[in-house]
Amino acid sequence: MSAVLQTAPTPRSYPAARSVAVAHGDGIGPEIMDAVLHVLAEAGAPLRLLPVTLGERAYRAGERAGIAPAAWEVIAEHGVLLKAPLTTPQGGGYKSVNVTLRKTLGLFANVRPCVAYAPHVVSAHPGMDVVIVRENEEDTYGGIEHRQTDEVVQCLKLVSRPGCERIVRHAFDYALRNGRRKVTCMTKDNIMKLTDGLFRRVFEEVAADYPQIQSEHRIIDIGAARLATRPRDFDVVVTLNLYGDILSDIAAELAGSIGMAASANIGLHGAMFEAVHGSAPDIAGRDVANPSGLLQAAVMLLVHLGLPEEAARIHNAWLCTLEDGVHTADIAGHGTRRQVGTRAFAQAVAQRLGRRPQQLPAVAYARADAPAPTAAAAATAPVPAARKTCHGLDVFLHWDAPGRDPEALAARLQPLAGEAFRLAVITNRGVKVWPQGRPETFRTDHWRCRFLHRDGDASPQALAALLARIADAGLDWIKNEQLYAFDGQPGFSAAQGE
Ligand code: NAI
């Protein structure tokens, strides 16, 4: 790949005071946060903690987005947030505050180590040690959704070349810094040839800059299955936002418990550290939750802030606690000698500060382990402007005439194509229904009608005139997509049967 150019701004340098915004979160959040803060205090970590209110509590206080402006100010000023899980309403209500935080603060990399601690903690895969690096800002998580017809809703999946490049580079840099041997990319580029295809292409380009690290690509479905059955085949996995979200929960659970995994959300201007799991309302307020995920997040935070000794002291004390069989309910098994609640677990970790584990490998961190990207590492090569030509238009219609007969729709549309265009194909949910559709194909009220320009270079005026003719004919166009080619390469997927 071409030399990396300095297009990203200089990253923030953290003040000596090491101020950290702290959100106690929802559900089990306050219990596990108190447990973690107890360990941090006992370890003498030099942190100035600045409480902020996010999530349900902010929402109940009248903040419609779940974040008060005062909280934004603290987080933006100090750039580091230790966050307990937040509840996100399902199927309605306010947007995910987690997603808003990640996107607004530009936390493009979500790093999730999934490690087994067998035989002390029962694991489906003793010896598992995989790091999932999840793209954190793009994909379907833009939450750009529309209802377009009576029957059909859509969600936009947006993927950018710079977005792919930064996350893939971050994964390789992480592998290099942490002595990892291989980075596996997982996509579904056999189906989503443009979006996932771009991610894979960028992965292959960036991989060429890291010849010392092995690289491979797997289709996400078989890749996920193999990760679940043979995690030892994997080391660092880099993938798109949605796949990474799902994969990291599975990997965390396979390693031992979802309650044990941590997540570092890293950007140039800040970082947010949290557990992988959610607010677990089913066990909230009962002092049974495992605070380990958030404690591991705090360890990553300490490393990030340049406090490697404190990080290692806490991490090793935690390993001793697991080894000694002091376990919360979620990880109780044959290695358990004393089952404890959230508070007692934190006390047990604090009591072991200064000790090193005897059987599990002790950790040591160096300042270089800090996951903060440098501006140079996060910079992306500029994407040269291509010569863009418009080959036509996909017009999406809400059409529900009796029988939903594609021949009848085509008969109405063909005369509207005019001199400049021709109706090439009609699909319904991506399946070709005209010409030569099959009667068995299920049809909704949502039709994609592809008009190709006869000269392959439609002007905006010609496109607007086509849409006007369709509207004047009383057809309900609910969306359109231009069919661009970039330097002659089609920038749109071929319609089936085209
Ligand atoms: P969840 O992760 O909260 O819980 C799933 C299961 O794991 C539950 O049975 C729960 O009891 C258990 N569990 C989770 N954490 C545990 C811990 N520390 N110790 C012991 N057991 C634990 O997932 P769920 O139920 O799907 O989501 C609950 C809420 O959390 C939702 O509103 C969701 O949107 C939110 N959420 C927030 C996240 C965040 O703040 N980063 C991440 C994931 C979900």
Image (cartoon, rainbow, N blue to C red):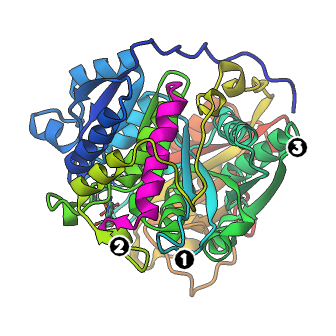
User: Which residue sits at x=20%, y=46%?
Assistant: 30
Q: What's the residue type where badge 3 is placed?
A: Gln
Can you tell which mark lies on residue 212?
A: 3
In the picture provided, is 97 more to the left or to the right than 473?
A: left
* Disc 3, SS: loop
The quarter of the rendered structure image containing the C terminus is bottom right
Q: Quadrant of residue 47?
A: top left
Q: Earlier in the sequence, mark 3 or mark 1?
A: 1
Mark-to-mark CA distance, 2 and 1? 20 Å
- Magenta region: which residues? 305-328
Q: What's the residue type where badge 2 is placed?
A: Arg
User: Which residue sits at x=38%, y=53%?
Assistant: 292
* Disc 2, SS: loop
In the rendered image, the residue lying farthest to the bottom is 440
- Mark 1 sits on what residue? 124
In the rendered image, the residue lying farthest to the left is 61
User: Which residue sits at x=52%, y=55%?
Assistant: 357
Please say if 27 is above or below 341.
above
Residue 391 in picture, x, y percent from top left = 74, 43
Q: What's the residue type where badge 1 is placed?
A: Ala
Foreground of the two, 118 or 52: 118
* Disc 1, SS: loop
User: Which residue sits at x=28%, y=38%?
Assistant: 37
Can you tell which mark lies on residue 337?
A: 2
Residue 27 in picture, x, y percent from top left = 20, 53
